[in-house]
Image (cartoon, rainbow, N blue to C red):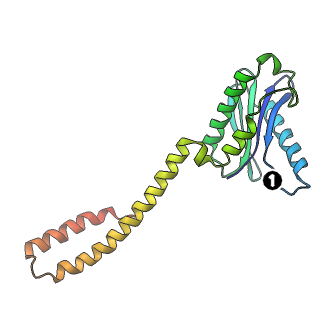
Amino acid sequence: MKLYSLSVLYKGEPKAVLLKAAYDVSSFSFFQRSSVQEFMTFTSQLIVERSAKGSRASVKEQEYLCHVYVRNDNLAGVVIADSEYPSRVAFTLLEKVLDEFSKQVDRIDWPQGSPATVHYAALDDHLSKYQNPREADPMTKVQAELDETKIILHNTMESLLERGEKLDDLVSKSEVLGTQSKAFYKTARKQNSCCAIM
């Protein structure tokens, strides 16, 4: 899971204006980085221009996903990530960034803004923080913990089932248990076997 780009744009007529952007192109060859960055900027502008106000969308391009959120006030955000990055986390990030941006940068500056004139420094921090969605997003962190608990539970159930098979041998060999107790155990075992873990 990787984030490559986080951009804030203004959806003007007819073109989208890039206000601020942060990139992580470290996974690309040194000689490709500027071209990749230019392509990400171009793609972000194109997606914002073709998206309706008040919309959210995810556009797939090869193995990448471009998540776009255009607010009703024409402020837009784009995240470019790999296809494994969770969409919900990407849209949470976009909403957070756009809310912060609209509070810190005056609305009058949006239509004529540029990365050089707009003063908003938090994009790089957000891009690095959200590289690991489990750490950045509480919901994803809880889901990961639940998945780990589920794995532990499955392992515990498997070990109990192995122990249960050994208990069957012990019950059948037992001289202390009466016939009625053995019958009760076998019936209970049959009833519990319907809940086998797949």
Q: Quadrant of residue 49?
A: top right
At 85% from the left edge and 24% from the top edge, which residue is drawn? 113
Residue at the outermost top position: 108
Q: Position of residue 66 (x, y in %)?
A: 74, 42
Q: Quadrant of residue 178?
A: bottom left
Look at the picture and state if 100 lies above or below 197: above
At 10% from the left edge and 82% from the top edge, which residue is drawn? 175
Q: Quadrant of residue 12?
A: top right
Image side of residue 143 versus residue 30, left or right:
left
Image side of residue 193 versus residue 170, left or right:
right
At 50% from the left edge and 48% from the top edge, which residue is drawn? 143
Q: Position of residue 136 (x, y in %)?
A: 61, 43
Element type where label 1 sits in the image: loop
Q: Position of residue 83 (x, y in %)?
A: 69, 51
At 76% from the left edge and 22% from the top edge, which residue is drawn? 105
Front residue of 170 and 57: 170
Q: Which of the image's four quarters has the C terminus?
A: bottom left
Look at the picture and state if 145 lies above or below 41: below
The count of marks equals: 1
Front residue of 72 and 34: 34
Image side of residue 133 versus residue 186, left or right:
right
Crowding at label 1, few (<14), some or many (≥20) Cα neighbours within 10 Å?
few
Q: Is there any visible trace of residue 134 in the rendered image?
A: yes
Kind of residue at badge 1: Ser
Quickly name the residue at label 1. 26
Front residue of 116 and 194: 116
Q: Position of residue 160 (x, y in %)?
A: 32, 69
Q: Is there any visible trace of residue 198 in the rendered image?
A: no
Front residue of 120 and 139: 120
